[in-house]
Amino acid sequence: MEKKNNTLEELNTVKRKKLTDSSFSVMLIGAAIMVFAAIVTGILFMAMMSKRNLLDMNEAEEYSKHYVYIISDKESDLWINVLNEVKAIADESNIYIEDIEETMGVNYSDEDLLRVAVNSGVDGIIYSGIKSEKVMILIDKAVTKGMAVVVLQNDIDSSIRQCFIGVNNYELGRLYASQIKKIATPKQLSNMKIELLTDADMTEGSTNLISLAMEEKLEEYIGDYSLPEVKITRLSARDMFSAEEDIRNFFVGDKKLPDIIICLNDSYTKCVYQALVDYNRVGEVQIIGYYSDDTILEAVDKGIIYSTVSPDTEKMGELCMKALEEYCETGYTNAFMSVNAKVIGRDEARELLNERQNEQTQD
Amino acid sequence: MSVRMNKRKIEKKWNNASIQTKMMTSFFFPIILILVVNTYMYTNINAMIARVDEIYTSNVTLNNLSAELTQVQSSVREYLENKGSSALNDYYMAEQNYRNLMNDIHEDITIGSQKIMQENIYNQSEVYLEQIGEIVQAKRGRNVEKYKSGYEEAQVIYADLQTCIHSLNNEQFKSNTKNYNVLLSSLKYMELVTITILLIVGLVNLVVLFLITRSMAKPLQQLSHAANEVADGNFDVQIEILDASDEIGVMSKAFNKMVDSIQIYIAEIRKSMRRESALKERELVMASRMKEVQLRSLQAQINPHFLFNTLNAGAQLAMMEGADKTTEFIQVMADFFRYNIKKIDSDTTIEEEVALVDRYIYILNVRFTGEIHFSKHVDSEVENVRVPSMVLQPIVENAVNYGIRNIEWEGHIDLKIYKQNDMVYMSIKDNGIGMSQDTIDMILSGEYFVNPDEEKTDSNGVGLGNVIERLQIFTGHKDVMEIISEGEGKGTEFIIKVPMHV
């Protein structure tokens, strides 16, 4: 009887334990699940909200300086490369580089943009655009107000800009001459016509310097033969598409084409190349281009463009920032900074294209 | 370790809490959790709605700035046209308002490019206002050339400013719209989160409540089931006891205790009833045995009455004739039969029983001319011990009839009555034909019966079985008689054992 009682008690204890455990544990587990669910969803919500608050107005970044760039042909690869370099350096120094045309959201002329920049009291201006009296006055006004003004490519030499950065035109002329020498023998050269396509905004002095350097170099080459006829054609960039139309006019009809066309900027180079192909006149004229974007390099690789002279865009961007910083810090900078240029022939073009292709594949 | 201890403590507290507390806790905890979650969500939603309200404020400010700028420009133009003092006042007012707004915007913090645009607008506005100031001065000084050219310049800057404000407004509208969309989607997300949390909490709450109420109801169900069982008469039921001091725990323990008590009482009642019925049974058996003896005596009563009268007449006749021996014989015989009739239904003393044996031996010796040699040794201390009547004589009769009747040697019967350890031993020993062990066993177990015809002829009607049964009923013990016989021809000894005090 006693044994039976004991067994019953043991049974009760086991069951009893099970009963109480389940009741309390259910309460605990339930509470834990509820609190856990509330916390997890709360945290998820907070995380989501913080992710969504990227546009929070209170997270403004303070910039140490504010520079503006006004570049007429900023869509071209050459200027994209230069500006990329400028922005990269500016990022490191917490400087804001503003494309004022983009922020204005309207199609303003270079002069208008320059005026807005000057009136906005920016710290520095990077300018590569048309050359006019108004531009000169505005640059002077900016300098007077203490802004640093750096002019690229074509110098506004009549202004009091702090610095001009570009390829040395004399050097450029010599590079072109070296290519011309490869195209023709001295005898052939004496009967040739060379067309130099340049920007209307390029100063006469600059173009003259190029042609002078070319002539000097060629004289050594041709010896007793007469120098080839060099014609400088100034294309206006002020009206949209007018330069392109002017170039196409060369190829329309049965006009006699020059033997060599030298392009002094990248857009003219591409334009000439395209016109040659479109009008089926490849081989009738030798082209020496400017800059080395993919289109130009491919043309060089195909032999449609004989060679191209490419300025060092990285260096240009670097010098640009250096000049601005120098002026802002010390109130003084070099008035002229030269950027090297190199000639890219067919072999180099192929090499460069391969390199870029590899880089793209790696990316 | 301490966490586990704390858990145990809380668990113990929880188990010991009253049902009301448990239920209140079970209901209140989820409600409070839902309340907290809701409050949190509500606060967030409110903050968000407030931000939605603020979103387009910057656009409104910029619109105001643009309108105020137009006001400045038009008031200056009006002043230049008519040089009216009210126009000048308007200009000053508009300029002041514009400056205030300008400063507000300048202090406003915005994201990267927009901040730069704000700076641009601020600086251009400074240039513009300066230019306007100079124009007004020139107008006052009637410097026509200057204010004319100045106004043209101011117009250009005004146009630039409007363009810039417009652009900034546009940019801010874009980012504000983005923020607005983000907030809208966040609100939807918040709605989803709230519903999810509420659903989870609700579901878990439901499950917890179900399990907790079940854990509370289960012991109650067991209790009611057990109560029904008890009501149906099954007291061998136990319920699982909660290790808790709440109402259910207390009730369960009390119930189990009650069932235990009922079982104990029932067991006691059963025991006493069994004892009582055993007593009654004994009485009944005793009575039935007495009746049996009485019946046999009554059967013999017809003859004894007639016999007593006859014997008395014989005795008187013998006395008148002077035959003393005959008188004594008849007198002893009459006494013997009278004892039989009188004492059969009650107990008596050993002394009277021995006297009866003496009479019986006297009669037999008269009958068989002194063939029976009888000796007796009775301890005087036990003479008054009470025994059932008619126990010694039937055994002596048995010794005479089956022990020494047909033997060829001289028959002896020895009666010894003595006391040993509060027991009285009555030994009747003969030197007759003896008994086999089987016969002894059969006699003692009550299975042995002598031939009834034989009994009728030469017995006073009381058998050994009757003697043993009456002795057993009288003493309450089974072991009341011992029969010892060493084998055929070696005699038999009957030993009756009765306690000194019954």
Image: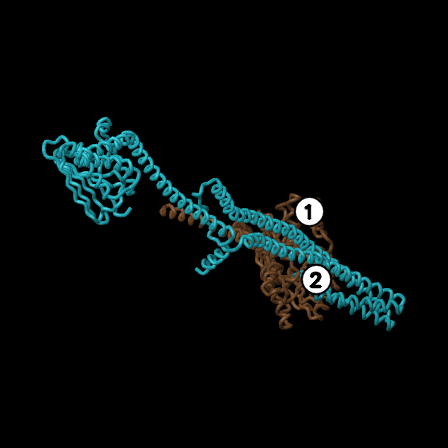
Chain colours: A brown, B cyan
Residue beneath label 2, please? B117
Query: How far separated are the C-alphas under marks 1 and 2?
Result: 46 Å
Vertically, is A341 above or below A259?
below
Does B360 appear above or below B129? Answer: above
Q: Quadrant of residue A35?
A: bottom right
Judging from the image, what secondary structure is the residue with disc 2 in? helix
**SS class of the residue under badge 1?**
helix
Query: Which of the chains bears the disc numbered 1?
Result: A
Farthest residue in the left direction? B409
Residue B3 in the image, given as x and y percentages of width and height: 46, 59
Q: Residues within 10 Å of mark 1 (few under 14, many from 20)?
A: some
As drawn, B448 above or below B264: above
Q: Are marks 1 and 2 on the same chain?
A: no
Q: Residue at x 69, y 71 (%)?
A: A146
Can see residue B86? yes
| B421 over B289 or under it: above or below | below
Q: Nearer the viewer, residue A25 or B429?
A: B429
Viewer-closest of B106 and B45: B45
Tell me the tag on residue A179: none
Image-quadrant location for residue B487 = top left
Going by the numbered disc 2, the residue's amino acid type is Met
Residue beneath the point at 51% across and 44% down: B224
Q: Is residue A225 visible?
A: no
- Three-letter residue code for mark 1: Phe
Mark 2 burial class by Cα count in 10 Å: few <14, some 14-19, many 20+: many
Label annotation for residue A251:
1
Q: Nearer the viewer, residue A216 or B401?
A: B401
Give the letter of the chain under mark 2: B
Residue A245: image location, x then y, percent: 71, 49
